[in-house]
């Protein structure tokens, strides 16, 4: 195939390229926070190159650079244009890539830094939350063929309108995984400030255990439920294109957590991890007319405003009206307010209110799909600790409960202990003994 034809349409996995020995390495902001960190990362990249791998490294902005750029924008405008925010925020990753290229040159290796646009990352036209449509890695492939190490600024691309776009939260992870798919990479290594994926947040539970392996499906649920180690959209791309992921620390050489498809060992785990999300907000619409199509109109309007909705419940209709509650990110509250205010008169509901004092606690495990008692046990543990459940959401491998934010730490500690996640693998045969050993 001609190199100019080698691109990937995210959404058409049958078009992925053949596997190569390319290694894609992604380094987060803490990994490139200062000169010492950048030199350490440069050495790690060069070591991979010495081992015979063509290397493409994706980098995030240094330390607090993105936050500082946002603050600078807010000093100028309370509501800056989204296009100009993309122009501004994309600078942070370009700085990291250029500095890392300089550090690699100092080690005697040839490197080239590329913007997302130069790397061939094509996106839709939604500023600040763009999605990757195609990747045409022609320039990357040419540089690799010339023996160069390629450094790509993460978190960004170029739209169909030829504007710079950014990919939103976790965008550098998405850049790395999508490039790995486009290049047919042997592995995509995600370097961060933790050693891998843990059974829960070690800051809350000190004896939380690092997982050696986890399935894509489980990691996707953990990420979607609040785990910060990777963003859900990047895990979804890895699953769709069967890209091996290795999540590990940039500060040590120890192995991290390998992410892949389910295997027999993974199936034996009832619960793999517990996570929580503190940035959720509960929205309740009161007195909504119980008519066909009303809910569809509300959630279609929220979708058009690019608001992601998670848990949804509707009360039983009384007197021809009902209440609907759902959760959304606190960062989207202003959009939610605008949408609902615009629909209030048209749909005829009484009012709506928001509650930012909630959080979501989630159990994730592939073994849940064949063990129905997991949810009941979770509810028992929360009740025993005096924690009221406000909303519940389930899938084949997760159970999520919306609770008051002030109870999150107690809930996570109690659930981690109840499911004995600190001890290692707990089989289905042992689960009937869990309740008595809480």
Image (cartoon, grey):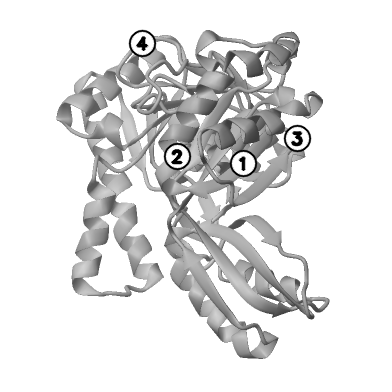
Label 3 to label 1: alpha-carbon separation: 12 Å
Q: Residues within 10 Å of mark 3 (few under 14, many from 20)?
A: some
Give the vertical position of 156 relative to 19 (above or below).
below
> First in sequence: mark 2 or mark 4?
4
Q: Residue at x 34, y 54 (%)?
A: 90
Contact (Cβ within 8 Å) of mark 1 with mark 2? no
x and y, in percent, of residue 386 in the image = 51, 39
Q: Which residue is mark 3?
A: 396
Q: Quadrant of the C terminus?
A: top right
Quarter of the image for residue 229 reads top left
For residue 23, side relative to residue 100 (left or right): right
Give the vertical position of 418 relative to 335 (above or below).
above
Determine the secondary structure under disc 2: helix
Please name which of the two marks, 1 or 2, marks the residue nearer to the observer. 2
> First in sequence: mark 1 or mark 2?
1
Q: Which residue is mark 1?
A: 400
Q: How many marks?
A: 4
> First in sequence: mark 3 or mark 2?
3
Please name which of the two marks, 1 or 4, marks the residue nearer to the observer. 1
Quarter of the image for residue 26 reads top left
Res 408 label: 2
* Res. 214 in view: yes
x and y, in percent, of residue 227 in the image = 48, 36
Please name which of the two marks, 3 or 4, marks the residue nearer to the observer. 3
Which residue is at the front of the view, 279 or 129? 279
């Amino acid at each position: 195939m001609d190199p100019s034809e080698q691109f990937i349409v995210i959404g058409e996995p049958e078009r992925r390229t053949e596997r190569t020995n390319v290694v894609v390495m992604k380094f987060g902001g803490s990994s490139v926070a200062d000169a010492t960190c950048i030199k350490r990362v440069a050495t790690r990249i060069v070591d991979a190159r010495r081992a015979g791998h063509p290397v493409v490294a994706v980098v995030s902005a240094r330390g607090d650079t993105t936050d500082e750029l946002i603050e600078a924008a807010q000093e100028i405008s309370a509501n800056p244009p989204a296009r100009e925010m993309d122009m501004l925020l994309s600078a942070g990753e370009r700085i990291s890539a250029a500095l890392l290229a300089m550090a690699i040159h100092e080690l005697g290796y040839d490197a080239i830094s590329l913007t997302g646009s130069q790397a061939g990352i094509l996106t839709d036209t939604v500023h600040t939350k763009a999605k990757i449509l195609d990747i045409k890695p022609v320039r990357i492939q040419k540089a690799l063929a010339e023996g160069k190490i390629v450094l790509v600024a993460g978190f960004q691309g170029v739209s169909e309108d030829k504007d710079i776009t950014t990919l939103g939260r976790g965008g550098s992870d998405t850049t790395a995984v999508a490039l790995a798919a486009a290049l047919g990479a042997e592995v995509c290594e995600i370097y961060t400030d933790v050693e891998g994926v843990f059974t829960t947040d070690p800051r809350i539970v000190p004896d939380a255990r690092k997982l050696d392996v986890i399935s894509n499906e489980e990691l996707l649920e953990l990420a979607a439920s609040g785990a910060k180690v990777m963003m859900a959209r990047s895990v979804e791309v890895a699953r769709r294109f069967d890209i091996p992921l290795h999540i590990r620390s940039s500060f040590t050489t120890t192995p991290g957590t390998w992410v892949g498809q389910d295997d027999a060992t993974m199936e034996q785990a009832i619960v793999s991890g517990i996570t929580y999300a503190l940035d959720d907000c509960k929205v309740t619409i009161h007195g909504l007319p119980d008519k066909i199509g009303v809910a569809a109109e509300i959630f279609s309007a929220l979708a058009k405003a690019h608001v992601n909705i998670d848990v949804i419940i509707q009360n039983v209709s009384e007197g021809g009206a009902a209440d609907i509650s759902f959760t959304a990110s606190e960062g989207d509250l202003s959009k939610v307010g605008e949408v609902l205010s615009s629909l209030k008169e048209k749909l005829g509901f009484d009012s709506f209110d928001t509650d930012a004092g909630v959080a979501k606690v989630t159990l994730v495990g592939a073994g849940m799909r064949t063990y129905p008692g997991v949810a009941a046990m979770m509810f028992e543990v929360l009740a025993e600790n005096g924690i009221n459940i406000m909303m519940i959401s389930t899938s084949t491998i997760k159970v999520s409960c919306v609770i008051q934010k002030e109870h999150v730490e107690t809930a996570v500690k109690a659930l981690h202990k109840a499911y004995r996640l600190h001890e290692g693998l707990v089989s289905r045969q042992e689960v009937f003994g869990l309740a008595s050993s809480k």
